[in-house]
């Protein structure tokens, strides 16, 4: 190792990218020179607080839309769910101290099943990803040089939907019992015949709400990261943590849409009485496994990538060396992100899929381990070439690497079909995925220590941090390694062979040690927030990413000017005047900078507060809680039925009202004039957000149509005609096709009218669109009414949702489409009112963006029509 | 061709193609050669969809990258559907 290599924060000159991390190019010893004026903390720094209450008041946290606040909310809430899920795990470990008969010990059989299921769901969904997204919210805008996310209120909305979805899960414990069919929620165990409690329905609906939060978040992050990077910061040069988040959100966008389809179908089976998962042929149980694992395998990387990002950042900072083979490391991650969508059937080797499919997916599974090998070696080699400093964040990241290697190697066993026959359903699987998943948590805990000084402005206690790591690492391995030894223990149940008891006792002790290590962390961080040593802008030598060039904690609008990388290193341009085209530094002397800043500030004043995201969260919570009272299309009996109906209606009114209020409320998102927008130059933020949302909707509808195709193939494609009252009756569908096509055309006419500023035309075509949409729904209602009451030899009782799988797929798929039409009509109504008051003339963008949605709904129908009416 | 005329022409094409799909069925092709007729009808749907996406949603005039995003979603679900259907064959 040459001195030169060791002393550059960005490491090698090897591929000529000294600026790869978007950091400052200052040589070592001079940790990044922040070209930043001093901040006056007392007056709130450079920036006015925009009516945002002080952070000591509760109101601040209810109304804030600032990405840093939202990041802190995510971190705090996710840690709450860590404790929630962790306590459930400890209860299970107590139960497993010795093998017991049902009813003995601390947990009864149903309670144990609930604990197993809730532990898995809460940890994977409500702790792991949101914990990573706390950092993503806080750090990514800082690393890319943005003042906030593209849609700050939607970001707050993501958070509130996340929090309320978790609370909804909590409520489900008090409605009979929470979901108790395992975190994978396999069918047919998940249908009401086997899990009849209302709480089980609520758990499923809580997940639906969680997925809504994730989808909104994905759209927001993708728009932000693609269109709001500082000038001169190309995607290639993004810091590695931001890179991992970028790939994570792309995976989330597509993967979670498939999960949403699965969950909506399950909800429909539970609430409305469709029969997708009650089928007794191949399709019943396999449909769920396909949809779930199509989501579930990318989910492994969705959870793990941010951890990898933290590892990459901390390895670079604490070895003083840029990661070895940075380009290859990024390339490997891109490969994994793509490959992750092609390995899902390795979770299904013990189902009835054919041998060809198993073989193919065994090969792709081995294929996906290869890029990971490259990443692991890149990390190891970075250590070899670097000069390691064993600070707490590094210890956790290094520990994570060790654990991930064990977890990865034991996973390769499961990827081999013959070995999986033996290991499936055993503690081998449990041990393997805890080494991977909790291995990821280990790195994220490192991230918490790493960014703690940036977020709070205080240092944590290094000694206690190391104590935490020692307890954590020992506890972790005591807990999970014995599971490999007694791998023959059956998974998910509390009965096991008595000779395994000593190993399970070691695991239980390890579990308590791991759990108590977090008490040390909470104590350390809590004390340090108040009493810790004041942290400088950059407390870590060699940290080279942009968040370390600004004060700790950063001011409300992050930067003292417009971040700019065009001349090779980070500088802040005076945003009051474009005259500072040389990347001039804000004049800091005697408040001059502040003045200069304020002049320009009026032009792109950013809003930071809105109460409506919170209210939408409350409304959604009430709506779904109310919905849980339905079974087979009717309310539960007795007084509770009325309560549920009341909750549902109240929730719907609150949700709808607050969405309207949010639309009407004046709110200014961050300015994007001075930013890199590759590869979406010329697609305005809202438009891009709409397109990205539609891409996820393609997957949602695609998964619904795919489910229909799958169950129809399983039944026999053409035998299917026996399941419907009359095959090939295209007329009702054709009429609706004409109606929708015409309405699409009228939306286009409305857009042209808005461009040409012809108010009469505009109003006329919007009203036409509305009338055509209503006609579509009326025609559909008449058709359904007819089918419900059909009297034929084959269907003497009519043809309703529960009649058979064909009726279930017909009503649910076209019903989902009808719901999209209904939402479109509400928006149309809103636009008619606004257009009547003279809006949109000369400003056709809102109509164009609505058109994107409406035409998409039209396109979906273009495929539903032949599939459900002709073929 | 002005945009209004273009939009109107596309509307007419969409209308005709939808009618053609039903005509294929009415002419009895579905009972004669189910899978050939199936292919024709689905291809007609795809053509309609391309017209709507390309012109009504202006995808033709957006950067290619937007098309790739949509294509990504489409490929994902096609992979899911075909692989799942194949796995039980």
Image (cartoon, coloured by chain):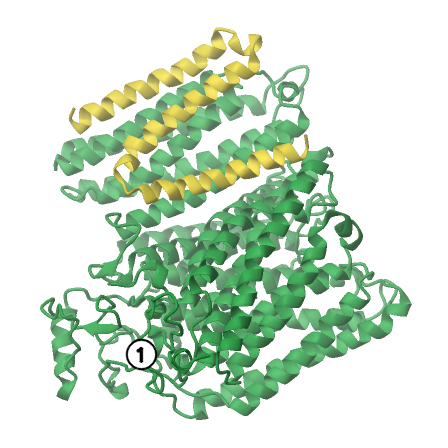
Where on the picture, by quarter, is residue A598? Answer: bottom left
Colour chosen for chain A:
green
Q: Quadrant location of residue A282?
A: top right
Label 1 sits on residue: A549
Closer-to-camera residue (A697/A333): A333
Disc 1: which chain? A
Q: Is residue A553 left or right of residue B34?
A: left
Horizontal and vertical percent position of residue A118: 65, 61
Q: Position of residue A245 (x, y in %)?
A: 44, 61
Q: For numbered disc 1, what is the local secondary structure?
A: helix
Nearest to the observer: residue A148 or residue A535: A535
Relative to A711, say whether A24 is above or below. Answer: below
The quarter of the image holding the C terminus of chain A is top right
Q: Nearer the viewer, residue B53 or A744?
A: B53
Q: Position of residue A842 (x, y in %)?
A: 13, 42
Question: Viewed as shown, does residue B62 lie left or right of A325?
Answer: left
Give the x, y percent position of residue B25. 49, 12
Say which chain is yellow: B
Q: Residues within 10 Å of mark 1 (few under 14, many from 20)?
A: many
The residue located at (24%, 81%) in the rendering is A36
Q: Nearer the viewer, residue A441 or A516?
A: A441
Q: Is residue A552 visible?
A: yes
Q: Work out whether A315 lies above or below A38.
A: above
């Amino acid at each position: 190792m040459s001195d030169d290599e060791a002393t550059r924060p960005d490491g090698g000159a090897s591929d000529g990218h000294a600026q790869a991390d978007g950091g400052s190019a200052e040589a070592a010893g001079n940790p990044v020179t922040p070209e930043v004026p001093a901040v006056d903390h007392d007056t709130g720094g450079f920036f006015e607080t925009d009516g945002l209450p002080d952070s000591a008041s509760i109101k601040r946290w209810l109304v804030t839309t600032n990405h840093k606040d939202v990041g802190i909310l995510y971190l705090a809430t996710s840690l709450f769910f860590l404790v929630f899920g962790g306590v459930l795990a400890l209860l299970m470990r107590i139960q497993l101290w010795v093998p017991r008969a049902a009813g003995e010990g601390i947990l009864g059989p149903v309670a144990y099943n609930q604990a197993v299921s809730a532990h898995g769901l809460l940890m994977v969904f409500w702790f792991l990803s949101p914990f990573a997204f706390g950092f993503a919210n806080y750090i990514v805008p800082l690393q890319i040089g943005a003042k906030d996310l593209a849609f700050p209120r939607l970001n707050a909305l993501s958070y509130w939907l996340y929090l309320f979805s978790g609370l909804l899960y909590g409520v489900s414990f008090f409605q009979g019992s929470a979901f108790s069919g395992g975190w994978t929620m396999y069918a047919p165990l998940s249908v009401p015949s086997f899990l009849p409690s209302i709480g089980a329905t609520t758990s499923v609906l809580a997940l639906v709400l969680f997925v809504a939060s994730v989808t909104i978040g994905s759209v927001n992050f993708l728009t932000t990261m693609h269109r709001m990077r500082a000038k001169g910061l190309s995607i290639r040069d993004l810091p590695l943590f931001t890179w991992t988040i970028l790939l994570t959100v792309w995976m989330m966008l597509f993967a979670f849409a498939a999960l949403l389809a699965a969950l909506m179908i399950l909800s429909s089976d539970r609430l409305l009485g469709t029969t997708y998962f009650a089928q007794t042929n191949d399709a019943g149980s396999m449909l769920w496994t396909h949809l779930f694992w199509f989501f579930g395998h990318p989910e492994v990387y969705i959870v793990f990538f941010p951890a990898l990002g933290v590892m990459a950042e901390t390895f670079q900072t604490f070895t003083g060396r840029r990661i070895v083979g940075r380009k290859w490391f990024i390339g490997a991650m891109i490969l994994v992100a793509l490959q992750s969508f092609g390995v899902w059937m390795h979770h299904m080797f013990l189902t009835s899929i054919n041998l060809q499919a198993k073989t193919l997916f065994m090969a792709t599974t081995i294929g996906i381990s290869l890029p990971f090998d490259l990443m692991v070696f890149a990390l190891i080699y970075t250590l070899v070439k670097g000069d390691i400093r064993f600070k707490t964040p590094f210890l956790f990241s290094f520990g994570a690497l060790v654990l991930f290697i064990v977890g990865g190697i034991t996973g390769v066993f499961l990827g081999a079909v013959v070995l999986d026959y033996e290991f499936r359903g055993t503690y081998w699987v449990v041990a393997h995925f805890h080494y991977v998943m909790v291995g990821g948590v280990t790195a994220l805990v490192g991230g918490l220590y790493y960014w703690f000084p940036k977020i709070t402005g205080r240092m944590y206690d290094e000694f206690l941090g190391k104590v935490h790591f020692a307890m954590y690492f020992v506890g972790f391995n005591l807990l999970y390694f014995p599971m490999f030894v007694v791998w023959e223990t059956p998974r998910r149940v509390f009965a096991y062979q008595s000779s395994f008891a000593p190993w399970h006792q070691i695991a239980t002790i390890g579990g308590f040690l791991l759990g108590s290590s977090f008490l040390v962390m909470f104590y350390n961080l809590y004390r340090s927030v108040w009493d810790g040593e004041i942290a400088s802008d950059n407390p870590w030598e060699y940290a080279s990413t942009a968040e370390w060039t600004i004060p700790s904690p950063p001011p409300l609008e992050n930067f003292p000017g417009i971040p700019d990388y065009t001349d090779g290193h980070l500088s802040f341009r005076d945003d009051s005047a474009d005259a500072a085209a040389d990347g001039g530094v804000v004049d800091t002397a005697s408040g001059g900078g502040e003045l200069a800043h304020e002049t320009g500030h009026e032009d792109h004043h950013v809003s930071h507060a809105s109460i409506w995201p919170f209210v939408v969260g409350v409304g959604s919570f009430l709506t779904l809680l109310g919905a849980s009272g339905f079974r087979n299309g009717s309310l539960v009996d007795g007084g509770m039925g009325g309560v549920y109906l009341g909750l549902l209606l109240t929730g719907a009114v609150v949700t709808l009202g607050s969405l309207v209020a949010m639309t009407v409320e004046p709110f200014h998102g961050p300015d994007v004039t001075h930013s890199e927008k590759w590869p979406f130059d010329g697609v305005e933020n809202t438009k891009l957000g709409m397109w990205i949302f539609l891409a996820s909707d393609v997957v949602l509808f695609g998964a619904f149509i795919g489910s229909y195709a799958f169950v129809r193939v399983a039944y026999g494609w053409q035998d299917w005609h026996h399941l419907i009252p009359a095959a090939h009756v295209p007329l009702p569908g054709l009429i609706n096709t004409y109606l929708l096509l015409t309405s699409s055309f009228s939306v286009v006419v409305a857009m042209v009218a808005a461009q040409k500023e012809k108010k009469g035309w505009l109003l006329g075509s919007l009203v036409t669109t509305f009338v055509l949409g209503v006609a579509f729904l009326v025609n559909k209602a008449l058709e359904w009414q007819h089918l419900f009451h059909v009297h034929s030899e084959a269907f003497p009782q009519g043809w309703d949702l529960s009649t058979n799988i064909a009726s279930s797929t017909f009503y649910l798929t076209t019903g989902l489409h009808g719901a999209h039409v209904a939402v479109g009509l509400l928006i149309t109504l809103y636009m008619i009112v606004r257009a009547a008051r003279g809006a949109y003339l000369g400003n056709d963008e809102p109509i164009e963006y609505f058109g994107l949605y409406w035409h998409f709904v039209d396109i979906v129908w273009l495929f539903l029509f032949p599939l459900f009416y002709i073929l | 061709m002005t945009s209004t005329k273009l939009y109107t022409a596309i509307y007419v094409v969409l209308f005709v193609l939808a009618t053609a799909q039903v005509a294929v069925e009415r002419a009895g092709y579905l009972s004669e050669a189910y899978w050939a007729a199936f292919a024709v009808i689905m291809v007609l749907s795809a053509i309609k969809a391309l017209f709507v996406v390309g012109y009504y949603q202006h995808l033709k005039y957006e950067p290619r990258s937007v098309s790739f995003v949509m294509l990504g979603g489409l490929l994902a679900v096609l992979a899911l559907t075909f692989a799942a259907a194949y796995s039980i064959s």
